Amino acid sequence: MFENSFKNIDNILHTDSGSATELDYVEQTSWTLFLKYLDDLDEIKKTEAQLAGKKYNHILDAQYRWDAWACPKGKDGKIDHHKAMTGDDLNDFVNQKLFPYLKKFKNPDADANTIEYKIGEIFSELKNKIVSGYKLRDILNVVDAMHFRKYEEKHELSHLYENKIKNMGNAGRNGGEYYTPRPLIKTIVKVVAPTIGETIYDGACGSAGFLVESYNYLTENQASLSSAQMATLQNKTFYGKEIKSLAYIIGIMNMILHGIEAPNIRHTDTLAQNINDIQEKDRYNVVLANPPFGAGIGREIQQNFPIKTGETAFLFLQHFVKILKAGGRGGIIIKNTFLSNTDNASVSLRKLLLESCNLHTVLDLPGGVFAGAGVKTVVLFFDKGKPTKKVWFYQLNLARNLGKGNPLNEADLAEFVKLQKALIKDGHAKADNENSWSVDVSAVDQKTFDLSVKNPNKKDETALRTPEEIIVEMGKLDTEIKSSIMSIKKII
């Protein structure tokens, strides 16, 4: 229904000098879609209020509503081109009046979880990059035909928006910052298995993939939801933090398109909080995340953590362990070198994880899962509150190389999910096979806490030669080299 609309918007942006990359396309599409969403939401709430015999107060003042400035309509329901601004008039209104007005909704005294506050946050971080007011008019006309009122419309828009995020994530080496492969997220959510009534948190939420898939999991696995359950899902279940402006905006929009009206995502630096300040009221039942990888965190931020390190993901892992409730569950993606690095921070962090949590499962992923990222990763599954006694490893061995044209899919992970459920239900003996094995923590080196992925079921297929064979081969090579040198001398 809307696929051509998205293509048309991209084509228009492609010809405008203000948008140069896939990231720009998503950003500019997002703010126009968001304002159209607000208009549809406003109409829905107005109708509900009228049916209940109540007075309704619009979200925006009259002159800033979609039908006043973006696409004013005539009596025939078509755009009134005499009233619809275009060119410089449209751009001047958007840049000098509309955006400044919307920014004011970010009131320090307002409730941060309301749609009004989200409006202020989003437009405090955004600017209109569409240089041509005529092209902006064309985009608004396309967006005007897109609606958010029916489930089918929201479902298709959310699917298309996810594809845009995926394309953006694959556009550069930092793809994982915006897009974690959905089959992997779905698998992690299945294993952690959140339930309605639990709180779910991602402190590095990016485009909110974990929160969206958790919402899908909770709604799709229920025959029917009561109004109280839906209210819980809307307001008291999903929580996130994101430091980067574009990722924050996309995360908000992604959750809205999937059915969460006022997402509880805060635009803030998670690592700026001293973890000693985290209290019981701040904790969550479930933590799901793919924290950013990379060194370079300054000493000022490191002071917020007992284990000092410049590695971003290691600081996030400390934060996640601290912010989980006792008995809470985590599913965290991290570089596989975390399991074996010998630096003090890595060793101390592994010790902390093993002693304060039950690290029951490690999923070892092949290279190529994250397009363009160039790193191998593992997923850590743990429960907080009891020390680890046994760790179950599963090594995902595929008969193909992964990449943009050959991505990870849910079928690839089906055996892992099946065996992991067997692990929880029937114990380690039922879960071990040629791709999986169990390690007793008492057998792990208590100085290094090395948890390297070493599949004991995988045979070493490299045929090692004896020293005598190597010496003979070296002699042959030496003779060939001398012969080649003699031939060259004769030519000279």
Image (spheres, rainbow, N blue to C red):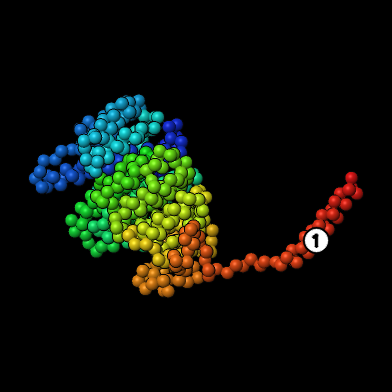
Is residue 216 visible in the rendered image? The answer is: no
Please report the residue visible at 20 percent of the width from the left and 45 percent of the height from the top.
44
Residue at the right extreme? Answer: 490
Q: Judge whether residue 230 can be spotted in this image.
A: yes
Within 10 Å of the Cα at label 1, are there few (<14), some (14-19), or many (20+) other Cα atoms? few
Taking the image as shown, residue 476 lies to the left or right of residue 401, namely: right
Rendering coords of residue 106 (x, y %): 26, 35
**Secondary element at image label 1:** helix
Residue at 14 percent of width and 40 percent of height: 56
Name the kind of residue labelled 1 in the image: Gly
Outermost residue toward the left?
53
Q: Is residue 236 above or below residue 66?
A: below
Q: Nearer the viewer, residue 12 or 126?
A: 126
Please state which of residues 61 and 106 is positioned toward the viewer in this rendering. Answer: 106
Percent position of residue 429, x then y = 42, 74
Please give the count of numbered marks on the rendered protein.
1
User: Which image quadrant is residue 412 in?
Assistant: bottom left
From the viewer's side, name the closer residue of 464 and 102. 464
331 sits to left or right of 259: right
Quarter of the image containing the C terminus?
A: top right
The residue under the point 37% across, 73% down is: 426
Q: Residue furthest front?
A: 447
Judging by the rendered image, the residue that carries numbered circle 1 is: 475
In the rendered image, residue 126, in percent from the top left (x then y), is placed at 35, 35
Left or right of 49 on screen, residue 190: right
User: Which residue is located at x 32 percent, y 46 percent?
Assistant: 276
